[in-house]
Amino acid sequence: MTAANTQLHDLGLPPRSAEQTELHPDLNRAHVRFINLGKTYDGSVNALQGIDLAIQRGEVFGIIGRSGAGKSSLIRTINRLEQPSSGRVLIDQVDIGQYDEDHLVALRRRIGMIFQHFNLMSAKTVWQNVELPLKVAGVPTLQREQKVRELLELVGLKDKHKAYPAQLSGGQKQRVGIARSLVHDPQILLCDEATSALDPETTQSILGLLREINQRLGLTIVLITHEMAVIREICDRVVVLEHGRIVEQGPVWHVFGNPQHEVSKTLLAPLQHGLPEELQSRLQLTQTCADAALVLRLQFTGSATEEPDLAALFSALGGRVRLLQGGVERIQGHALGQLLLAVNGSPHNAEELRNRAARWAQQVEVLGYGV
Amino acid sequence: MGFERLLQGAIDTLLMVGVSSLIALLVGIPLAVFLVTSDKGGIYQAPALNRVLGAFVNLFRSIPFLILMVALIPFTRLIVGTTYGVWAAVVPLTIAATPFFARIAEVSLREVDHGLIEAAQAMGCRRWHIIWHVLLPEALPGIVGGFTITLVTLINSSAMAGAIGAGGLGDIAYRYGYQRFDTQIMLTVIVLLVILVAVIQLGGDRLARVLNKR
């Protein structure tokens, strides 16, 4: 009987069925799990505090936060490049806290890692860089050759195997990094700001490659970033870190659609469009003249899976409805976004308009009256 | 005074410099690796031992070669049984060159990006793998450059050793050029030394350039 079921039993409730456990994958099956993890540097700075988190097998899990939030320390506790000060890290339900060098070497061969600055050996060719992890593991030459060739093909750098890292572009370097991280067929891939040093186009191609690897090889990806766009692009779930604590977590669409914490909102800001400044300056809180238009903000937080029906929305509002600004996107099958509408000549008052709009949007806000 | 004497001097100089630099290389690199890896935050962290060894290296580095050579005379006699000739000079030359080269190599090793060490750890390298496959290959161009400087410094020091009876080009220049005012010999020795230094410097620079893939 599991601990949870013991509790249920004590409360006089029936134990959970196998089916229920399936629907709620419990913590005991997490691929990576942090239990009350803490990290203190030099006895004073709390880099991480009370981190409790379960990362499921096969998911792309994002950790986001501002610089200095503790993302880097957190991801490094997974392969013990960072030693936690307190709490535990479980990989496949095994506590890695007391691992000696032999165990760590074996563990790290099951966990690939890629870096913001790629960290390729400058004195080695592309081929030698990818081959290095196999070489130090004592894999025979023939197998090494086969594996390196296979991976360079996967990342699309077959013809660059003789080049040195200095001769490659940033995107190509990261592809070498990815190939290198996969040579031991890891079950987990850690990405430390893997696209932060790349331009937007290259970022897209690298994220696409990571997605493909996640789906084809079924490995669990844990990534840290300070860019919400990266999270939106490939993550299934996300946690927001601030001052070493988790301040928000959930499926990506949920955090994007309805961010609760100040930090999440700040990080999301670059992706959202506010009211155009020129309109903002003309906005008044009260209706000063009769033909002033009511400005409404309709937010779609993703709880409905269908995009808004504009014809129905507009006819419900009545009068003349102008679109000031807006957009809706789909994240993980959920419609997210906002519309800024200016309504005038409607037979309904502000309160009524708001209630009507609320039938389509999850959140409606009256911003004021525009002239 | 003829061609043979000059040739013998050149051979003696090359022998002194060659043997002492080879020993400095073989001892200096492990010493440099130890100084880097045993430092705080290094892969074989041992700060106390690091400080002791660092102080020892600094001690030898701070003694001028001429004084070191004289001070080491009893030790030299103990090792090679004489205080005169090429082999007697090799002892102080080696003892001066090893810490000198180790410090330069240490700087190159320290310049290896910490991210590379982290990447190596993350891919499952053991610590000696990191030294062998990451630290040394990445620092190699700098180490070659440092060895070149060490060779040139050794030629310089060997001339000083020559002056107190070690033989070599320095000895010839001192005896014939200084004590007998033989300008021709003096100039010949200077030209030979300049050529020797130039060849070493050019060769070392070229090798470092070929090895540097950054």
Image (spheres, rainbow, N blue to C red):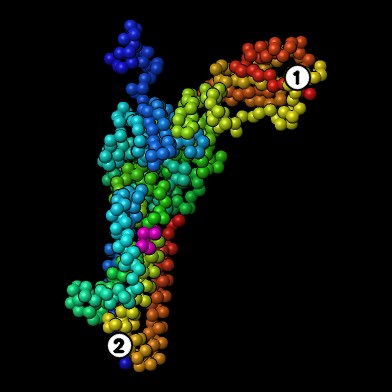
Report the residue at 30% width, 31% height from top: A95
Horizontally, is B21 left or right of A212 in the view? left
Q: Is residue A234 visible?
A: no
Percent position of residue A97, x then y: 30, 34
Q: Quadrant of residue B103?
A: bottom left
Report if residue A227 is visible in the image: yes
Question: Is most of the magenta stretch helix, strand or loop?
Answer: helix
Mark 1, Cα crowd under 10 Å, few <14 / some 14-19 / many 20+, is: few
The residue identified by callout 2 is: B5
Q: In the image, is residue A42 above or below residue A165?
A: above
A339 above or below B113?
above
Where residue A138 appears, as percent x and y from the top left, is 27, 45
**Residue occupied by mark 1:** A286
Q: Residue at x 28, y 14 (%)?
A: A1
Q: Callout 1, which amino acid?
A: Thr
Position of residue A210 in the picture relative to residue A279 (left or right)? left
State which quadrant residue B191 falls in: bottom left
Q: Nearer the viewer, residue A164 or A246?
A: A246
Question: Is label 2 or label 1 in front?
Answer: 1
Q: Chain of mark 1?
A: A
Task: Please say if A164 is above or below A291.
Answer: below
**Magenta residues (range):** B103-108
Question: Looking at the image, which is closer to me, A54 or B82?
Answer: B82
Q: Quadrant of the C terminus of chain A?
A: top right
